[in-house]
Amino acid sequence: MQKIQHWNETAERITGYRAAEVMGKSCWEMGLHPMDEEAWAIFKTAHPLVDSDTGLQYYETHTTIQKKDGCKLPITVKIFPTKIGDEMVGTVEVFSAR
């Protein structure tokens, strides 16, 4: 499972989690996984870019996550592949509050 390797001040402000709390952990470990049914079904079975043979270069979804204080937050998630040559080595995932 992919681990969080960068967490900026905006992510801290949006979610309530400090970088030190999330670094090296997955979104699933932190409870930051998608909460609505459609996105949950997609991410629970496979990561839309990493675990697919579709050749997608970009993925976007609207979902809800749970903040540190327990409140649900609607967000937009944009996911971009990170490649070395033709090999995918990870993703960059950007989220913003809706």
Image (spheres, rainbow, N blue to C red):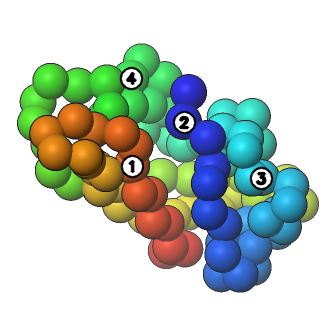
**Mark found first going from the N terminus, 4 or 2:** 2
Picture disc at residue 76: none
How dense is the environment of label 3, judged by Cα within 10 Å: few (below 14), some, or many (20 and up)?
Answer: some
Q: Which residue is mark 2?
A: 2
Say which residue appears at 61% left-offset and 41% top-offset.
Answer: 3
Q: How far is disc 4 from disc 1 in space, using C-alphas?
A: 13 Å
Give the residue at x 62% y 54%.
5
Q: Amino acid at mark 3?
A: Val
Q: Secondary structure at mark 3?
A: helix
Q: Residues within 10 Å of mark 4 (few under 14, many from 20)?
A: few
Q: Earlier in the sequence, mark 4 or mark 1?
A: 4
Residue ranking furthest to the left: 55
Mark before the other along the chain sequence, 3 or 4: 3
Residue bearing the label numbered 3: 22
Q: Earlier in the sequence, mark 1 or mark 3?
A: 3
The residue beneath circle 1 is 91
Residue 80 pos. (x, y %): 30, 56
For discs 4 and 1, the disc positioned in front in the rendered view = 1
Is residue 31 visible in the rendered structure shown here?
Answer: no
Q: Which mark is residue 46?
A: 4
Kindly report which numbered mark, 3 or 4, lies closer to the viewer in this rendering: 3
User: What is the x, y in percent for residue 42?
Assistant: 37, 29
